Image (cartoon, grey):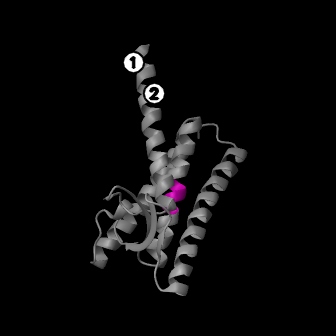
Amino acid sequence: MNNFTLKKIIIHILIILFIFLLDRFSKIYILNIVETVGEVDIYINSILHLILIWNTGIGFGLFSFDQSYAYNFITILIILINIVIIYLIFKSQKIVSYFYTFILGGSLGNLFDRIYYSAVPDFIDLNYKGYHWFIFNVADIFITLGIICLIFAELLNYKKTNEN
């Protein structure tokens, strides 16, 4: 282990728990609206709109399948990737481990939904002048943020090692 103390492990667990709970509360809020009103169709402004869709694929609705064997295969693959991410959290240096922690927190939020609901509720719809991005959720935000930060960290590290 890379000098991982109990304090660092607790901090990572708390971050994962915060992301997981933030994601759960946002999804429960949206699902309660559906239960009460019958649908979610909330216009916030010209860019942000909340509308519920059920995602049976991976991030942003990619690779959606109706067949249970494909869905189960993807779920098992996600579990295996989460195990690798846990390893990378312990193996990585300083701040990079936190980027993996963001990814893991979001991934566990979506994994919970895949197992509990057999689909992931996505509800954040961003659009600009009629051009829509994929509908996503809070967990997807943290997964994406973690991946973007990892890319920047790798680019900075690459530049730093090539300057020497």
Q: Are marks 2 and 1 in contact (CB under 8 Å)?
A: no
Corner quadrant of residue 3: top right
Q: Is residue 138 left or right of residue 81?
A: right
Q: Secondary structure at mark 1?
A: helix
Corner quadrant of residue 17: bottom right
At label 2, which amino acid type do we have? Leu
Say which residue appears at 60% left-offset and 69% top-offset. 25
Query: Disc 1 designates what residue?
Result: 162
Q: Considering the image in quadrants, where does the N terminus appear? A: top right
Q: Where residue 86 sits: x, y (%)? A: 52, 52
Residue 86 seen by the camera: no
- As displayed, is residue 68 above or below residue 25? below
Please check the rendered image and state whether residue 107 is part of the magenta-colored stretch, yes or no.
yes
Q: How far apart are labels 2 and 1 at the CA level?
A: 10 Å
CA neighbours of label 2 inside 10 A, class few (<14), some (14 to 19), many (20+): few
Earlier residue among tags 2 and 1: 2
Residue 145 seen by the camera: yes
Q: Magenta segment range? A: 104-108
- As displayed, is residue 9 above or below residue 40? above
Q: Where residue 92 sits: x, y (%)? A: 53, 39
Pair 2/1: label in front: 2
**For the image shown, how many numbered marks are present on the structure?**
2
Say which residue appears at 43% left-offset and 59% top-offset. 46
At label 1, which amino acid type do we have? Asn
Corner quadrant of residue 93: top right
Q: Where residue 41 sits: x, y (%)? A: 45, 75
Query: Disc 2 designates what residue?
Result: 156
Q: Where residue 72 sits: x, y (%)? A: 35, 73
Please check the rendered image and state whether residue 33 is part of the magenta-colored stretch, yes or no.
no
Give the prevailing secondary structure in the magenta stretch: helix
Say which residue appears at 44% left-offset and 68% top-offset. 122
CA neighbours of label 1 inside 10 A, class few (<14), some (14 to 19), many (20+): few
